[in-house]
Structure formats: structure tokens, C-alpha cells
């Protein structure tokens, strides 16, 4: 699917943020494990969470989705070994978290993915899980992933060599499913939705900072569902709308129901330091997660330097932050972000190709990018390749707000993995986006 976004000088309105992708996937995985009747509302009805539901149903769960409501029925039998491959589509989170779950279930499963997922590194998950007692084989460290019956140890402890919430969550879910204790240590705090969800359902999990590391302990836990679980809005989706509001010539927008868990919302502080007029309203806690409405107005931004512990917090927002930086006054340098090279695309290269096409000067490094921002609008009608990556596609569609004649973005179908309502939401704010 190719899209054309016309130049739009002004955007206004109030929009609802779609459900969080990370939390939606964790809710169906942990919900299947708890094995009680469960209702989830505010679920992200996108391709990634649906792949995860299909994978869980393939191993014996009974999950149905109706719009943004999901029901899980209590299983009467144990999990099963499916005869066919289980396809996680484009979802790295789905595959890596399912690896943790399946490792403890005593079943045999072969996990596969689409072209992009088949090139993503899986040893970062299979190695610690195998040290924990799992039995996982990957082809050249990538999918397909073959999991056979293992024997998960008690009191496994893992010091994470990379900052990854998927790795951390996979290990915690394996221990949870095996009813064993585990300790995971991370140098830089990554998103903590798994920990918060286990705590919300009554599990024995705690985190503390020891010698500058975040240390998470899980003890054998019996989780319980007492009421419907409500998924808060996805900060990573809201980020496109926030940056759209900041770079548009005139804007006044409110994004409602945005998850602002501090391990996810570092972009707000960054954009505020860049001069962004952003305010947080109606803050509350839903199912252990902080949520609020975010008000954004068009702002004159300036460049910033970003590296270190904030990187895992904003990892999915760096593509759209690069768009904000491209229209800011002065240089923005983002470093220590080499993880971007192994996302749905090599996002550092994809950002660089896109910035070249819209005529924004920058320098690409192995672990980051330096963007020489300027207030100049984009001239001509550039054509951008999304490299099949949803976050690259949406970032450059947002950049159309500062174009003189519009922007073409090729290969946008992947938007449906994380933000299926993106085009409608942008149109409701006044942006014209159409298929070509
Ligand atoms: C996610 C963690 C991050 C993020 C991904 C979702 C999760 O990946 O980029 O989109 O749900 O745990 P890593 O753990 O690989 O950094």
C-alpha cells in the first residue's frame, strides 16, 4: 500500500489513542497462563496482537477478539503441541515472549515469522532461556525457532548484556509459567509492563535499584483475575500525533487516554527540553499503568543531544523524534542507539534514506545519527521508502505537515501492525492522507 499525504498547514482536534501494543500482547499471554475466564478491553486490534492471539490459540488457548474487546475462556485441557508452524507475522514481541512461555509448557512448537521477523536476532532470547533449562534451536540465530520440552531451573539469575524489555519479559514469563523464582538485572531500565501486570494480578514480583542496576525478582506466584483488564493507550502511537502537533504551522490537539508509564514516556521530557509546548492533563492509574490526556501546540523547537539510559525508554520513538529534529533549529545528535539497526527495519538507515529524500542534512553513524535541523519546509514532492516498517512510514507521513506539495510514502501496509486507525485519526485532525 502506497500513501500520499498532502501538505496541511493547520491541525486541530481531540483524538483517542489506540491500545498499547506491548501491553495488549502481554495481557493475552499472561491471561492464557492464568487460565481463568478473562475480558480485556481497550485491546489493540492490530496485526501484531492478532498474531499473538493466533499463536496462543494454536497451542490450545481459547481467545476471541471483537473490535477492541477480547475474551479468554478457561482451558479445560493442557496446552498442546500444534502440528503446523506457528506464525508470528511481523511481531518481534510476539515471538520473543511466546518463546519464554512455550519453553515452560512441555510442548513442541516451531515459530516462524514474515520476511522482516525472519531476519531478526533471536539468540538474545534463546541463549538465556537455554541456560535456564529450555530447549530452543534457531536457524543462524534467527527464526524459524524450534522449541522442545525442557526443564526450567529454579533461582535462575540473568545479567542482561543488552537493554531489551522483550528479553527481560521472556525470561520472567518462562519462570512464571514454570512456577519458579528468577532474578533479572538490567543496567538501563527498559519498559516494565510485564512486571506491572504480574503485580496487578497478585504475583510476587519486585524491582529495586542495586549498584545502579534495576534488579527484578519473581517468586512462584498464583495470579488471579478479578475484573476486566483495561489496556491503556499506546505512547508510541501517540508520539506520531504529538510530533505532528509540534511541527505543524498551526495546531491545537489533544490526544486522550495515552499510557505515560515513566519507562515509556521519556520523549515528552525530550520534546519539552527542545521547546515543545506539551501539557499533561487528567492523569490517573488504570490497571497499574499511568494514563493521561496530552495537549500539544505548534512550537519552535531547538536541537538536543541524546544518549545513555534514556535510549531504551524512547527506542520506538526515535524515527519520529528525527522528524521533530529535522525541523528544529540547530543540531540534534542521537547516539548509543545501535539497537535501531535490528528493529522491523534497520531504522537508522531508513531514517537516513528518508531524510535524504526530504532534503534534510544529517550524518549517519553506526550507533546513531546527527541531524542538522532547520525551519525550512520540504520542497518538491519527495518519495519515501518505508522499508516495510510501520514506524518509518508514519514518521514520514507526519513530515508532510511541513512539505510544500505533499509526500509519497511507499510500502505502508505495516502501519496495520501497530496503529490500524492512523489514517483515520490523522484525517480527523485535518490531514489529507490517501492511497495512491
Ligand atoms: C517491546 C520492547 C522493545 C520495543 C518493541 C516492543 C516490548 O524492543 O522496541 O517495539 O513490547 O517489550 P526490545 O526489547 O527489543 O528493545
Image (spheres, helix red, strand yellow):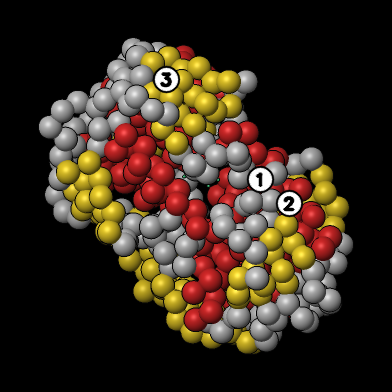
- In the drawing, does residue 313 fall left or right of residue 359? left
> Which residue lies under the disc numbered 1?
345
Point 61% across, 61% down: residue: 1
In-image side of 256 versus 340 (left or right): left
Which residue is rendered at x = 42% and y = 64% of the image?
Answer: 18
Label 3, label 2: how far apart the Cα atoms are: 33 Å
Query: Residue at point 77% right, 59% down?
Result: 354
Q: Is residue 272 above or below residue 348?
A: below
Residue 32 in the image: state x and y as whole percent: 25, 38
Q: What is the x, y in percent for residue 21?
A: 43, 52
Residue 350 tag number: 2
Residue at the image position 73 percent from the left and 51 percent from the top: 350
* Helix, strand or loop at mark 2: helix
The kind of secondary structure element at disc 1 is loop
Q: Quadrant of residue 267?
A: bottom right
Count neighbours of disc 2 (C-alpha within 10 A) and say few if under 14, some if 14 to 19, many if 20 or more: many
**Label 3: which residue?**
147
Amino acid at each position: 500500500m502506497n500513501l500520499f499525504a498532502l501538505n496541511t498547514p493547520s491541525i486541530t482536534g481531540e483524538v483517542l489513542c489506540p491500545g498499547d501494543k506491548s501491553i495488549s500482547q502481554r495481557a493475552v499471554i499472561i491471561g492464557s497462563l492464568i487460565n481463568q475466564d478473562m475480558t480485556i478491553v481497550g485491546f489493540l486490534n492490530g496485526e501484531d496482537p492478532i498474531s499473538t492471539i493466533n499463536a496462543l490459540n494454536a497451542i490450545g488457548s481459547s481467545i476471541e477478539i471483537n473490535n477492541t474487546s477480547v475474551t479468554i475462556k478457561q482451558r479445560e485441557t493442557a496446552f498442546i503441541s500444534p502440528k503446523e508452524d506457528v506464525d508470528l507475522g511481523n511481531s518481534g514481541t510476539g515471538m520473543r515472549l511466546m518463546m519464554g512461555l512455550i519453553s515452560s509448557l512441555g510442548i513442541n512448537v516451531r515459530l516462524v515469522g514474515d520476511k522482516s521477523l525472519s531476519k531478526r536476532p533471536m539468540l538474545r532470547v534463546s541463549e538465556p532461556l537455554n541456560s535456564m533449562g529450555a530447549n530452543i534451536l534457531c536457524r543462524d540465530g534467527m527464526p524459524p525457532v524450534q522449541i522442545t520440552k525442557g526443564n526450567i531451573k529454579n533461582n535462575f539469575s540473568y545479567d542482561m548484556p543488552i537493554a531489551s524489555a522483550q528479553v527481560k519479559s521472556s525470561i520472567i514469563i518462562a519462570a512464571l509459567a514454570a512456577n519458579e523464582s528468577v532474578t533479572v538485572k538490567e543496567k538501563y531500565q527498559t519498559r516494565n509492563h510485564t512486571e506491572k501486570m504480574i503485580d496487578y494480578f497478585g504475583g510476587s514480583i519486585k524491582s529495586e535499584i542495586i549498584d545502579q542496576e534495576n534488579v527484578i525478582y519473581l517468586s512462584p506466584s498464583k495470579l488471579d483475575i478479578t475484573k476486566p483488564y483495561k489496556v491503556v493507550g499506546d505512547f508510541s502511537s501517540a508520539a506520531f500525533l504529538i510530533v505532528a502537533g509540534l511541527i505543524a504551522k498551526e495546531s491545537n490537539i489533544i490526544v486522550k487516554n495515552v499510557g505515560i508509564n515513566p519507562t515509556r514516556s521519556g520523549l515528552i521530557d525530550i520534546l519539552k527540553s527542545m521547546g515543545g509546548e506539551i501539557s499533561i492533563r487528567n492523569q490517573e492509574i488504570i490497571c497499574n499503568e499511568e494514563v493521561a490526556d496530552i495537549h500539544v501546540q505548534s512550537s519552535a523547537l531547538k536541537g538536543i543531544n541524546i544518549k545513555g539510559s534514556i535510549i531504551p525508554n524512547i527506542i520506538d520513538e526515535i524515527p519520529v523524534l528525527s522528524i521533530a529534529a529535522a525541523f528544529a533549529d540547530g543540531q540534534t545528535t542521537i547516539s548509543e542507539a545501535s539497537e535501531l539497526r535490528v528493529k522491523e527495519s534497520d531504522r537508522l538507515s531508513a531514517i537516513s534514506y528518508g531524510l535524504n529524500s526530504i532534503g534534510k542534512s544529517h550524518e549517519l553513524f553506526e550507533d546513531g545519527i546527527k541531524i542538522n535541523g532547520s525551519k525550512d519546509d520540504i520542497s518538491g514532492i519527495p518519495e519515501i521508502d518505508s522499508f516495510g516498517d510501520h514506524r518509518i512510514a508514519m514518521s514520514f507521513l507526519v513530515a508532510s505537515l511541513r512539505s510544500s506539495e505533499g509526500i509519497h510514502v511507499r510500502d505502508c501496509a505495516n502501519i496495520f501492525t501497530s496503529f490500524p486507525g492512523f489514517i483515520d485519526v490523522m484525517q480527523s485532525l485535518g490531514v489529507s492522507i490517501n492511497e495512491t
